[in-house]
Amino acid sequence: MLDPLILVALACVGALAGFVDAVAGGGGMVTVPALLSAGLPPIAALATNKMQSSIGTTIAVLTYWRRGFVSVRALLPSVAATFAGSMIGALIVKQIDTSLLNVAVPIALIGVALYFLFAPSLSDADRVSRLPFPRWVPLLGFVIGFYDGVFGPGTGSFFTIGFVLLFGLGITKAAGNTKLLNLVSNLSALVIFIHGGDVVWQAAIVMAGGQVIGGYVGARAGIRFGAKLIRPLVVVVSVAMAVKLLVWP
């Protein structure tokens, strides 16, 4: 049984993480350390984080969808591919060596940050796609979903840059599409965590309440301010995650 003050603090952390997640991803940088500080074991902290963040991401997806920034029908094949990739990654993570990712992922995240910082043409306007959307987005979903099941940090940033760089989506539309596929990859891994009894429901429920507020406000802010908010926040979150992985892997 967690202390009531700790639960209040976790609810506030959930709201903050929901806002960050809805705009740029990376809310787990806030929530996982908070859950560990509350005394949860690492596996329980990861499982509880997946549960509560899925609620906030659902609110963000619905908000982007209602505003026309997500086409669920166009993404259905990618949803299935992302779910499959994440499930496979979560099932085999204990059988593979992920130590190389502690170096490779921060480098990739810094690359994402530099692209969003210096690319002059990034805006909310769609551009010409470099690859056919229906054929290649499912592959993007499977690969990044697999990565999320195995490792996880930076998943949102990798989805966003994929949609912008490969498929020419404007930043706000890329953020909306990212939220949907990120939600799917989270739910896939969450199935395994729930089956294993790893979720601490008391913490998950109060944090989910904060996530509902943060996810809605973050999505509305992303829609209202578009590239002016999403672009710098993706840079900040990507760099922060890279530093965290390099200094505190």
Image: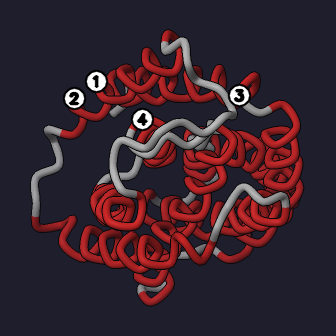
Taking 141 as reference, is 29 above or below it? Answer: above
* Along the line of sight, the residue nearer the viewer: 84 or 200: 84
Mark found first going from the N terminus, 2 or 3:
2
- Determine whether label 4 and label 3 are within 8 Å by CB: no
Callout in the foreground (1, 4): 4
Residue type, label 4? Leu
Q: Position of residue 51 (x, y in %)?
A: 61, 70
- Residue at 56 percent across and 39 percent down: it is 29
Mark found first going from the N terminus, 2 or 4:
2
Question: What residue would you read off at disc 3?
Answer: 227
Residue type, label 3? Ala
Q: Is residue 33 left or right of residue 167?
A: right
- The colouring scheme, among rainbow, by chain, secondary structure or one colour, is secondary structure
| Residue 2 visible from this viewpoint | no
Residue type, label 1? Ile
Callout in the foreground (3, 1): 3
**CA distance for labels 1 and 4:** 17 Å
Question: What residue would you read off at disc 4?
Answer: 165
Question: What residue would you read off at disc 2?
Answer: 103
Task: Label 1: state its secondary structure.
Answer: helix
Mark found first going from the N terminus, 3 or 1:
1
Callout in the foreground (2, 4): 4
Image quarter (top left, top right, bottom left or bottom right) of the N terminus = bottom right
Q: Position of residue 164 (x, y in %)?
A: 49, 38
For label 2, the crowd category at 10 Å Cα-Cα, with few meaning under 14, some 14 to 19 and many 20 or more, is some
Q: Which mark is residue 199?
A: none
